[in-house]
């Protein structure tokens, strides 16, 4: 059995059969064509990305790939949850810091105002 390689566009998919080679050839040929009009571009072309998403829709019909897509969804959902949790913690910390700064500022303003009043007397 051959070693499964990661998909050239969606690197979280393990390819079977000729999928890797066929997709890699498409990525390369699209990149070569795109380089003719945009020689400084590197990476996967916009047209190739669109083609890849359409390919993914077809791959999802195969249980082998559908399972990987489901796992990816779980990973992304977990990552989003973790980021949200981290954002909430940071936001709370920042709000506390803001409150401390504002309170100290107000206290200093009061002190300054009182001292100005005393000077005027």
Image: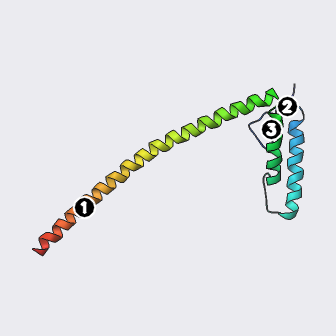
Viewer-proximal residue among 57 and 93: 57
Viewer-proximal residue among 45 and 63: 63
Mark 2 → mark 1, Cα distance in angstroms: 69 Å
SS under mark 1 = helix
Sequence-first tag of 1 and 3: 3
Mark 2 → mark 3, Cα distance in angstroms: 16 Å
Q: Dot 2 surroundings within 10 Å: few (below 14), some, or many (20 or more)?
A: some
Residue linked to disc 1: 108
Residue linked to disc 2: 16
SS under mark 2 = loop
Horizontal side, residue 35 vs residue 69: left or right:
right
- Return the mark for residue 66: none
Q: Residue 39 occupies which quadrant of the picture? A: bottom right
Q: Nearer the viewer, mark 1 or mark 3?
A: 3
Q: Write the residue at 24% across / 61% down.
A: 108
Q: Write the residue at 13% across / 75% down.
A: 120
Q: Write the residue at 29% across / 60% down.
A: 105
Q: Dot 1 surroundings within 10 Å: few (below 14), some, or many (20 or more)?
A: few
Asked if the residue at tag 1 contacts the one at tag 2, i.e. Cβ–Cβ closer than 8 Å, the answer is no
Sequence-first tag of 2 and 1: 2
Q: Quadrant location of the C terminus? A: bottom left
Residue 102 image offset from top left, x and y in percent: 32, 56
Q: Which residue lies furthest to the top in this view?
A: 1
Q: Which of marks 2 and 3 is in front?
A: 3
- Return the mark for residue 57: 3
Q: Residue 107 occupies which quadrant of the picture? A: bottom left
Q: Is residue 68 above or below residue 24?
A: above
Whether residue 75 is visible to the viewer of this picture, yes or no, is yes
SS under mark 3 = helix
Q: Write the residue at 79% across / 62% down.
A: 40
Q: Quadrant location of the N terminus? A: top right
């Amino acid at each position: 059995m051959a070693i499964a390689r990661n998909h050239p566009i969606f690197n979280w998919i393990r390819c079977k059969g000729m999928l890797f080679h066929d997709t890699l050839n498409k990525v390369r040929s699209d990149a070569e064509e795109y380089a003719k009009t945009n020689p400084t571009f590197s990476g996967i072309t916009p047209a190739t990305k669109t083609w890849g998403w359409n390919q993914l829709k077809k791959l999802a019909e195969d249980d082998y790939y559908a399972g990987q897509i489901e796992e990816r969804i779980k990973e992304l959902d977990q990552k989003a949850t973790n980021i949200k949790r981290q954002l909430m913690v940071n936001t709370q910390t920042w709000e506390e810091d803001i409150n401390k700064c504002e309170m100290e500022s107000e206290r200093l303003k009061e002190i300054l105002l009182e001292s100005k009043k005393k000077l005027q007397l």
